[in-house]
Amino acid sequence: MEKQFDIIPLNEWLPTDSFPLVISGPCSAETREQVIGTARKLAAIPQVKVFRAGLWKPRTRPSTFEGVGDIGLEWLTEVQQETGLLTAVEVARPEHVEACLKNKVDILWLGARTVVNPFSVQELSEVLKGVDIPVMVKNPLNPDIALWLGALERLNKSGIRKLAAIHRGFYYYHHALYRNQPMWEVPIELQRRVPGLPVICDPSHISGRRDLLLPVSQKALDLEMAGLMIEAHTDPDHALTDANQQITPEALSELIASLVVRQSRGNPEFETKLQMLRREIDKMDAELLDILSKRMKIVDEIGQYKKENNITILQKQRWSEIFFDRLNLGSRIGLRHEFLLQFLQLIHEESILRQEEIMGFNEAGGKTD
């Protein structure tokens, strides 16, 4: 658990009266009419509290639309004045921050491409010293929780206490269902390490497709994330950036209405039953850990025996027998194949490391137990 963070609760700096909290707006601000028109429609949706728009777009290739730049800040000021919505903008350079502060943008966020570079994050943290403004930090492109934590920590140490994380998924080089893999375990681990840190889900960038927005949004709510950032555009089919993942404000309203908001706690009878089941899990976990400890002690004995008899660590036949036997056994009792593969591999790797230490190896010499 990370103890160095000093964070102001989300409900003290962002309206959270209508759950789920939704941040919405176009991927890119394109024209004044597009920005104002989208904001007017979004303001009619009670859950939408923040209007987002990209002004400086970090694109892979320079021939694509890279944003309207500073002129868009004037449009966002009109949004604030006309709709009452808070405004949020992605910043990647110190001059972006300075322009946003000058034009009274309400919330800043750091994008995934910026978070991967600690030098860039530090520059932004320096320019934000002494500034009381909320900052949201998207996860880096790859599932590197240390980079994500590092960006949050740099900002917090610079005095930013109104802090939130945005889960937008992770790049995966294989073709997959999602544009960016959710890897839900990563934001869950982030919340475990930094209690009190709100995590907002960005279903648009995870999905990359309109038809996946609803299930991803529902999953985020079921995992008790603090809110959703969903891109909306009055004419998404002709958007200049990320057209496939944007929806109309009307479609957003329908999506929100379709979400099932579950209670984080139930009635007393439910809580009593839940606590009983959790105690059973706690007991089983203790027994499981005890069994694993006993197993590793036997692994140590095997390693010592191999050392005394000058036997190699690598025993291919033995590992093959264990692997297929345990897979077949686990499948018969209802355990998922993928879970079993990962579980067996972890146990195997730990067994190797322990035997290498006993035999005095510095590098892996094989796989067996």
Image (cartoon, rainbow, N blue to C red):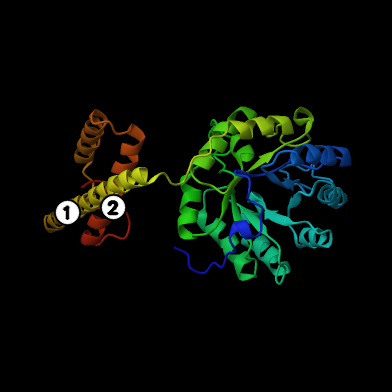
Where disc 1 sits, the SS reads: helix
Image position of 151 with respect to 312: above or below:
below
Residue at left offset 60%, top offset 43% = 20
Work out how far the residue at label 1 is from the one at label 2, CA to CA, in angstroms. 13 Å
Residue at left offset 66%, top offset 40% = 230
Image position of 296 with respect to 220: above or below:
below
The amino acid type, in three-letter code, at marker 1 is Lys
**Do tag 1 and tag 2 residues touch (Cβ < 8 Å)?**
no
Question: Which quadrant of the structure image shows residue 135?
Answer: bottom right
Q: Residues within 10 Å of mark 1 (few under 14, many from 20)?
A: few
Where disc 2 sits, the SS reads: helix
Question: Which quadrant of the structure image shows residue 209?
Answer: top right
Image position of 336 with respect to 87: above or below:
above
In x, y percent, where is residue 144?
A: 52, 53
**Residue 350's mark?**
2
Is label 1 or label 2 in front?
1
Task: From the viewer's perspective, tell me whether residue 2 is left or right of residue 9.
Answer: left
Between 136 and 365, the one nearer to me in the picture: 136
User: According to the image, label 1 marks what residue?
Assistant: 294
Task: From the viewer's perspective, tell me whether residue 355 is left or right of residue 198.
Answer: left
In x, y percent, where is residue 357?
A: 25, 61
Q: Which residue of the protein is positioned furthest toward the front in this rendering?
A: 268
Question: Which quadrant of the structure image shows residue 362?
Answer: bottom left
Q: Which residue of the protein is positioned furthest toward the bottom in this rendering?
A: 130
In x, y percent, where is residue 194?
A: 50, 60
Task: From the viewer's perspective, tell me whether residue 44 is left or right of residue 344.
Answer: right
Q: Residues within 10 Å of mark 2 (few under 14, many from 20)?
A: some
Residue 63 in sight here: no
